[in-house]
Amino acid sequence: MTPGNRQPKWDIYEAVILLEGYLETLQGEEPKVQIIKRISTELRRMAANRGLDIDDIYRNENGISFQMQSMDSAYQGKKIYVPATRLFEKVVFLYRNDTERYLKLLQEAKSMVAAKKNNKDAFMVWVASVLPAKRCKWIEKNILRVEQFAIATKMISGSIFDITDISKLEVIYKSAGKNKVFQIKNRKLIKNINDDFNVYMRYCLQLPIQTEKKEEASVSTESYNLVADASAEMKEVLNVVDFERIESMAFTKPRSITFFGKELSIPSTWKDVYVSIVAVLYKYYPDVFSSLSSFPGSTRLEFGKASDLGHMTSPREIDEELCIETNFSATDFIKRIKELLFICGVAHDSLTIVYERRIGTTASNSTSSFSSTACEAEFYAYLQNTVKLADRTCSSYVSSIRSAERYATNKGYESCSLFSENKETTIVTATELYSDSDFIRYNEQQHNRFSAAINKLLEFIGAEIPKKAIASLGNSGNKQTSATAEIFGRIVTVLKKHYEYGFKYDSIRELMRFRQFAEAMEISLPEDDELLKAAILSSGTVIDDKVYCKNDDMPQELQCIVDDVFSSGAAVIYYDSLFVNKQEWMNSYVITSPEMLKEYLQKNIAGCSFAKKFMIKGNRLPEKEAVTDEIKRVWGNNQSVSVYSLHDRLPYIPLNNIWRVISGNDLFVLVSEGEYLFIDRFCISEDEAEDILDFVDNACEENGFASLSDVPLGSIEEENYEFSQLTIYNAIYKKVLSGKYHLNGKILTKEKSELDAVTLLKKYIKDRDECTFDEVADKVIELTGSTNRQYAFQALYDDMVRVDRNRFVANRLVNFPVDEIDAVLSGFITDNFRAIRDVTTFAMFPICGQNWNHYLLESYCYKYSKKYSLHVIHFNDKNAGIIAEKYFNKKYNEMLAIAIARTDVELVPEVIGQYLFNTGYMAKSKYAKLGEIAQRASELRKER
């Protein structure tokens, strides 16, 4: 959850589920309360399935009820009770105008809600089928011991059973093995723990490949460092091939192959893996291989008969009808296996290849592959954490660097490494690339993606761009031959027809499909894959990992849209707001997200500064300053304006951003919910301001403090008659006193001080033998100008002892025999806690100098008892609250939920509120969090 329990923004999937529920309420076939409850359950489950850490407040029934009113406004087209959000208006628009897309979103949302498979239960079933019953008895508890260790060391954040990646489990296993505390703590069980955890890893080995979300119990970077130590020895970590994200397979060795649950022969090399998989695919799909000679884009013969052996570099015979080329790198083998699975129509998760990756290298003065990988990882982290680029953009930059290195190698450069531990090597390679006219042309064809990545790498290592490189980039020609233009025209034709939503240029599969589309359209393309890819990149606009068809009109229209916004006087545009406000135009050019819009803006709009979430006309400004200027610009002549009205006047700034900036700003004063006073519109004369300063200065000199409520108002109230006294006092502080005096509550001091109303009240009651609550409450009004019972209670409970409803006495007038009293209380306080009024008699309590009653008991538990503590929502006169054992350490709401769960009370907020009031747990039957308490009580009942 976000700090301060602020709820995360709703997304479109949550919104379609809410709209579906709203439409059901209109039909009236099910009670609205039940629909709200179901929506809350579904959205909380969706969040859990996404790996979010949610609390009791997240999308609870109260929140859903509030948002349902906002959806009502969106559906009715006007404000009913709660204003409609832009998102809800968009979803209603889709429901009415684009049913197909709405239903698709709803289907996707429902799939997100569907409960995930319980891997732990599946594992226990599997264990029961392969191990004796004796071995099964403690296996779960032993694995959970490792889970507790992993959570405590922050290697994971959730259940160990959510992790099925062997490499991650290996890291956890080895870390536990190295941890002396874990080994000593579990010394009697360590062999069983190791054996049982190995059983779980064996189970995960036979599972289909699963792509786990990073959020779900991911192993932290620090955890990996425990394995990859600085020693010269090679260390091995198990991995499973991920066909969706093929990585470099250098320094790896295959361990096992499982196809449709059946383990194939144990391989010793990647060539063995390739041969085994081709053999089994050939057995089941012979027709595929009968017409296959090579992969698209390859000029080599890769599949043939025995008679073709002489045409291959490293042939292997499958049978008399099929022999295959095997002269490839480990990475190329994996890519070819992926393509064969695609051609044969076999799902990736049907094939599991487990391999070892060696971490660490022997000491060497030369730049190794491992050090190159380390440099790559550091550069990626710099782009992600310092430059704040999106993950896909970071990956694109790294990929471009690697492509440039391959270009340098193929050209026979003396220095071919950009990812190098040696700074000079990187600079020499970059300089040579920038001096190569062929590379410059190739770079321009690809929209300068290589130079952008290399320049960012040079920035990362603290090197300047070579001067000759700048000259080369500036002087390179940009002409295209008519033949090239013709090729581009053909490619654009294919892109327009089949790739409206972008072409993924790094996918071999997509390149194959592109050729198939072109062939069906009778369009000829370059035979070489790299040339075709370069031509496609030059024919469109590259955004992240996709190429979109260029449209000559789009940049001009986008410029007009931005100019129109700026011509209205606005200087700030948030990408989200522009995307929503111009949705129809965005759809016409297939701009599918604010992130994509941002890319187009950065590529096409000049004279602006671009931040992560917004753009500013002219020079860069901090967000708070920029939005404040916009608020001031549209404020008008009124003293106060609502945030919603400001949002109407600032359609390109999200409502939440206006809320955030205005609520923490000294230029604005809260008047009422959503309504703020602009301090420049506050009416106060110079003489009145001077009188206030003189008064506060004199009071501070005399008493050490002044009360804000005592400052002379003169005619200020009359001049600002619309506002409450509280607003006026706050405005006075911000306009006249802020910067000169420090405010703590209502107390003003010259220096920053802990002095507040409660502190002053404690000074007032100090050394008094007896005091009434009414006296101290009157003193609160004198100090602050308003009633605040809790200030009075806090001071009295802290520094005196309560002996009845209205009377408090000095601590020295009471003598509590603590051990005896705690022993008596233990007879009343069962099951960790009880309501104060559950102590029904004081006959057994020892003499203490005052007559025993519930008020005296409250004071005793509040600050004297060794074993028990007092818990209240607010101090009160009704002895409403809880006495709990100190070690129990539960929050008040959790204890209320436990108390309800122990009963058969109906879990309806009104019912449980009345029950908690009647039994003394609460001083009132109304409480804002009763819905959450009811939900938690329901969960606890199920656990019983």
Image (cartoon, grey):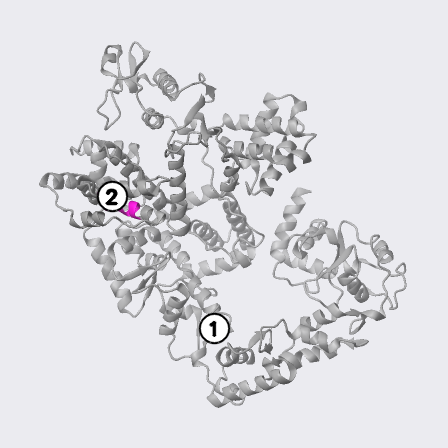
Q: Which residue is mark 2?
A: 431
Percent coordinates x, y for residue 890 in the rendering: 68, 53
What kind of element bears circle 2? helix
Q: Amino acid at mark 1?
A: Asp
Give percent across and percent down for residue 300. 23, 22
Residue 802 to residue 213: above or below? below
Q: Label 1 belongs to which residue?
A: 666
Q: Quadrant of residue 73?
A: bottom left
Identify the residue at image location x=66%, y=82%: 782
Nearer to us: label 1 or label 2: 2
* Between discs 1 and 2, the one toward the N terminus: 2
Asked if residue 476 is positioned above or below residue 4 in the image, the reply reads: above
Stretch in magenta: 446-455
What amino acid is at disc 2?
Thr
User: In the current view of this chain or complex, which residue is farthest to the left?
Assistant: 482
Examine the rendered structure and indicate whether residue 546 appears above or below residue 789.
Answer: above
Task: State the mark number for residue 464.
Answer: none
Q: Is residue 452 magenta?
A: yes
Say whether residue 205 is left or right of residue 305: right
Residue closer to the observer: 478 or 38: 478
Q: Residues within 10 Å of mark 1 (few under 14, many from 20)?
A: some
Can residue 843 be seen from the camera position used here? Answer: yes
Magenta highlight on residue 343: no
- In the rendered structure, the answer to whether residue 597 lies left or right of residue 839 reads left
Residue 274 percent coordinates (x, y):
36, 21
Residue 604 position in % (x across, y down): 24, 55
